[in-house]
Image (tube, rainbow, N blue to C red):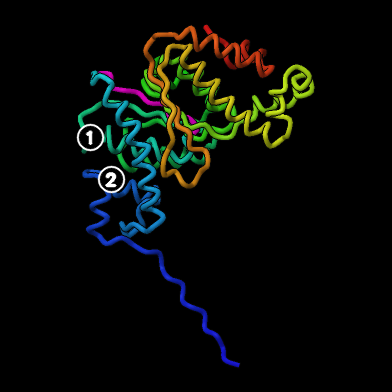
C-alpha cells in the first residue's frame, strides 16, 4: 500500500513591498499597524490583514468627512469612542487625522472600555507611539456620562458593536454632551425583544400584527429591527438629521447597519409623534418614560 504524503501547508500570501506601500496612506505609522496586527512584524500584508485594513479605511472614510466639517479651533476637536475594545478605530483616526506628522489639526480622542486589561494596553501603546492626545478610560458607557475625566462637550461620539443597550447609552451620552455627530453600528439587542416577549399574550389578543413576534426567533429579529427604527426616530426628535446605510465589506459581522446622526437643532415633531405611535402599537409605551424619554 502506497503511503500518501500530506501536501505542505502554504504560508499566508504576503503582498510585495511595493503593493504594501500602495495600500498604506502617506505618513501612516508602520509601528501602529504592526501593533494592531494589520501588518506583520516584517511590515508586510497577508490576505487577512489586507481585508482588515480595507475595512478600517472604509469606516474611517465615513468619519473623516465629519471631522473635516468641524471648525479648526484652538481648543481642538473631541471624539469619544464607546466600547473601544483594543481602540483600533481611535488609533487609526488619531494617526491619520491628528498625528502631528500628518496634520496640524488639534484634538483629543477618548477610548471608553470596560475591560481594564485592554485599557492598560491601549495606554501603553499610545505612550510608545507618542500619541499624547489620546486618553483611555476604564468605564461603562453609562458611567462615562458622569465622569469628570471627560469634557462637558464632545464633538463626535462613536459606538461600534456596543452590545445590547450600550448603543442607547451612547446616544444618551451624545445628547448630554451635545455631540455634533454620532456614528453608531448597533450590535445585539435584547431589551425591546424582552418587552415584546413579556407582552405577547396581551398583544395577540389585541392585534393580528402580534403574529410578527409570536415565535421566539421572530421576536429576536423583530426586536432588533424595531430598536434601530426607534433609535433613529428618537435622534430625529432630539434635533438630529439621520442617515442609515450599510458598512459594505464588513464581512466579519452580520451587524453592519451604520447610523449617522448630525445635529441640526431642528427637532422633528413628526418623528416624536411616530416614535410614540410605534411604541404604543407594539405595547412598548413604558419605554417612553425611560429609554426614549423626550426632553
Which of the two residues, 223 or 118, is positioned nearer the viewer here? 223
- Name which of mark 2 and mark 1 comes first in the sequence: 2
Position of residue 232 relative to residue 214, above or below, is above
Q: Which residues are magenta?
A: 74-83
Task: Name the quadrant containing residue 267.
Answer: top left
Q: Is residue 188 above or below residue 45?
A: above
Does residue 143 show up? no
Residue at 42% from the left image edge and 21% from the top image edge: 242
Residue plotted at (34% across, 41% down):
57
Q: Position of residue 93 (x, y in %)?
A: 33, 35
Q: Horizontal and vertical percent for residue 60?
A: 34, 36
The picture quadrant where one finds residue 94 is: top left
Measured from the top left, where is residue 71 in percent x and y? 25, 19
In the picture, the disc for residue 29 is: 2
Q: On the rendered structure, is 272 left or right of 286?
A: left
User: Which residue: 59% across, 25% down?
Assistant: 226
Q: Is residue 82 left or right of residue 278?
A: left
Look at mark 1 in the image and give the residue it sits on. Answer: 100
Amino acid at each position: 500500500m502506497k503511503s500518501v504524503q500530506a501536501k505542505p501547508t502554504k504560508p499566508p500570501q504576503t503582498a510585495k513591498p511595493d503593493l504594501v506601500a500602495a495600500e498604506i496612506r502617506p505618513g501612516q505609522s508602520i509601528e501602529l499597524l504592526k501593533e494592531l496586527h494589520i501588518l506583520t512584524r516584517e511590515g508586510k500584508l497577508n490576505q487577512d490583514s489586507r481585508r482588515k485594513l480595507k475595512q478600517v479605511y472604509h469606516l474611517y472614510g465615513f468619519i473623516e468627512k465629519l471631522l473635516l466639517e468641524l471648525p479648526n479651533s484652538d481648543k481642538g476637536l473631541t471624539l469619544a469612542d464607546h466600547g473601544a475594545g483594543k481602540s483600533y478605530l481611535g488609533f487609526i483616526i488619531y494617526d491619520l487625522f491628528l498625528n502631528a506628522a500628518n496634520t496640524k489639526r488639534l484634538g483629543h480622542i477618548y477610548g471608553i472600555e470596560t475591560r481594564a486589561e485592554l485599557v492598560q494596553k491601549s495606554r501603553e501603546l499610545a505612550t510608545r507611539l507618542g500619541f499624547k492626545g489620546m486618553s483611555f478610560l476604564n468605564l461603562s458607557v453609562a458611567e462615562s456620562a458622569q465622569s469628570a475625566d471627560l469634557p462637558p462637550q464632545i464633538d463626535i461620539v462613536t459606538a461600534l458593536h456596543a452590545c445590547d443597550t450600550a448603543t442607547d447609552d451612547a446616544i444618551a451620552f451624545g445628547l448630554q454632551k451635545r455631540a455634533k455627530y454620532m456614528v453608531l453600528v448597533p450590535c445585539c439587542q435584547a431589551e425591546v425583544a424582552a418587552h415584546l416577549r413579556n407582552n405577547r399574550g396581551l398583544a395577540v389578543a389585541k392585534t393580528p400584527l402580534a403574529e410578527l413576534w409570536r415565535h421566539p426567533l421572530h421576536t429576536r429579529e423583530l426586536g432588533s429591527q424595531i430598536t434601530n427604527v426607534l433609535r433613529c426616530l428618537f435622534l430625529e426628535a432630539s434635533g438630529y438629521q439621520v442617515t442609515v446605510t450599510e458598512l459594505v465589506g464588513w464581512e466579519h459581522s452580520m451587524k453592519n447597519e451604520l447610523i449617522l446622526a448630525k445635529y441640526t437643532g431642528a427637532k422633528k415633531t413628526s418623528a416624536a409623534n411616530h416614535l410614540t405611535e410605534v411604541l404604543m402599537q407594539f405595547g412598548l409605551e413604558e419605554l417612553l418614560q425611560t429609554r426614549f424619554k423626550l426632553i
